[in-house]
Amino acid sequence: MKVTIEQDRCIGTGQCVLAASSVFDQRDEDGIVVLLDDNPPADQADGVRRAAMVCPALAIRLAE
Amino acid sequence: MSTAAGPEIPDFPVARAPGCPFDPPPVWQALRNNAPVSKVRLWDGSTPWLVTRYADQRALLADPRVSVDSGRPGYPHLSPHGGGSNLGFLRMDDPEHSRLRRLVTAPFAVKRIEAMRPMVQKIVDDLVDGLLTGPKPVDLVEAFALPVPTLVISELLGVPYSDHQFFQENSTAVIRRTATMEERTAAGRNLGEYLGELVGRKLAEPRDDVLSELAARIKAGDLTHREATQIGVLLLIAGHETTANMIALGTVALMEHPNQLELLRRTDDPHVVATAVEELLRYLHITHNGMQRVAVDDIDIAGLTVHAGEGLLMLNEVGNRDPEAFPEAPDTLDITRDARHHIAFGFGVHQCLGQSLARMELQVVYSTLHRRIPTLRRAVGLDRIPFKHDAFIYGVHELPVTW
Ligand code: HEM
Ligand code: SF4
């Protein structure tokens, strides 16, 4: 699974962090998303899909 | 804009059905099945579109052709007295909205909110101690539901809690649907003056709090004093009234669902508590009037065209009961359900900034209150509890409890 993020769209809700904290984090200075792992292992797939689904800013893209 | 004024267009808003204080009005639930985007009539005779399906609400809330600017013609005003004028970037579109929101996003990041959990636990424990040593019956709203978020947001912003009477009264006036124009303007001005002065003090003597962070942004030239004040007012209003209503309404709902309450009381698994909080947010909906928007371009949705300049009401309480999104008994409270994709915090770029804080507070509250006072119960019948049908934010005015 390939993950990409668009920081320009992100509004810093942290929902992705709640869904998959080993894949997504938030920048200290402004709460904007950072990608920790752009090719997460299979056991993270559900959380990452969940993150993409709940992201209110449509800032997370997946290629499976 | 359509001027069709047939008697078949239903009035909006309407109160929830008698005896069903947790359910959206049946008339809107029926619309979701029959006419998911359809006209309703507001107090001023205007007829915006009511959007009731989960998928349509998400699509429109994330659509840049939809505006939150209450100054645009066609914007659906829910009362004759304005409203929303004190809500800062909540009523601004991008890019202005995004510029301001980003300046105050850091303190609401998941990790920083998690670091506040012990502080919130202490606040909740102290208030429960107070309940247990105080008289009963007691009004849980006054003695617990309001103080928890008020103390927390005061601490986070750096607002002296000793002023809480003042800012509670004024915030309530800003969001009361029945407040007059004069009352609302005066309350907004009072809060603005108060926070403006406080931001001034933080400029001179910064502390470790959000108003001081905003003051630093003023110094750096990122914000004007006025913008910082406006953000402070928005956070103060949004930060305590909402959570207070969720605490009280959630408590009433759990008492009406003893099996669910028992599940929650018996667990010390934070995951179970977190799941329960998401379901309570989905099921209860304190934002019972939905979210107001106006189309700035023609938009095709649900087989029809919403034209530029037409108002939109996204009734998220009905979207959150949509069987397409919550296939299993959506009208039932089930705290074991995975409800994380609910839209109780909205959707799109205006989705709640304080959601991680609200979640954490509710997790601490629901897991502590009922564990420490296992026999907590209503002191009056459900029919004697005054529900806030008349407020922008739903909840209960009063909740007499005993144990
Ligand atoms: C259970 C409690 C809460 C609920 C149900 C709730 C709900 C909402 C909803 C539905 C919106 C979107 C409004 C719209 O799109 O028109 C919103 C926005 C907002 N909320 Fe909350 N909220 C809660 C708690 C809080 C708290 C604790 C804070 C802050 C300390 C807060 C701050 C905000 C702010 C600043 C916005 C505007 C965001 C923007 O326009 O970008 N909320 N909230
Ligand atoms: S869920 Fe979306 S908007 Fe929220 S922090 Fe993650 S990427 Fe940003």
Image (tube, rainbow, N blue to C red):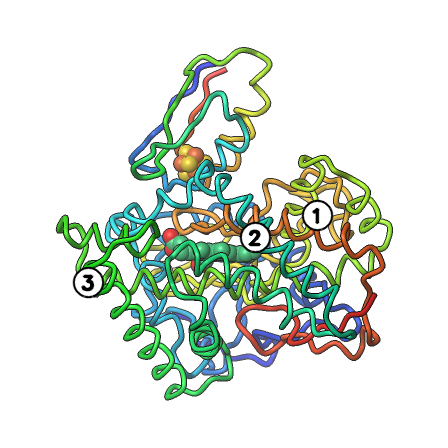
Q: How many labels does the image show?
A: 3
**For residue A19, side relative to residue B326 (left or right):** left
Which of the 4 image quarters holds residue B75?
Answer: bottom left
| Foreground residue among B189 and B294 | B189
Q: Is residue B239 above or below residue B104?
A: below
> Which amino acid, by three-letter code, is at mark 1?
Ser
Q: Earlier in the sequence, mark 3 or mark 2?
A: 3
Rendered residue at 29%/37% (across/down): A29
Give the labeled residue for mark 2.
Answer: B344
Q: In this view, does B221 lie above or below A63?
A: below
- Does the beta carbon of the residue at mark 2 sit less than 8 Å from ligand 1? yes
Which numbered marker is on residue B123?
A: none
Give the labeled residue for mark 3.
Answer: B225
> Which amino acid, by three-letter code, is at mark 3?
His
How many residues crowd around disc 2 within 10 Å: few (fewer than 14), some, or many (20 or more)?
many
Could you say where residue B160 lies in the image, as x and y percent from the top left?
40, 66
Q: Which of marks 3 and 1 is nearer the N terminus?
A: 3
Give the labeled residue for mark 1.
Answer: B367
Are the residues flagged by discs 3 and 1 from a single subunit?
Answer: yes
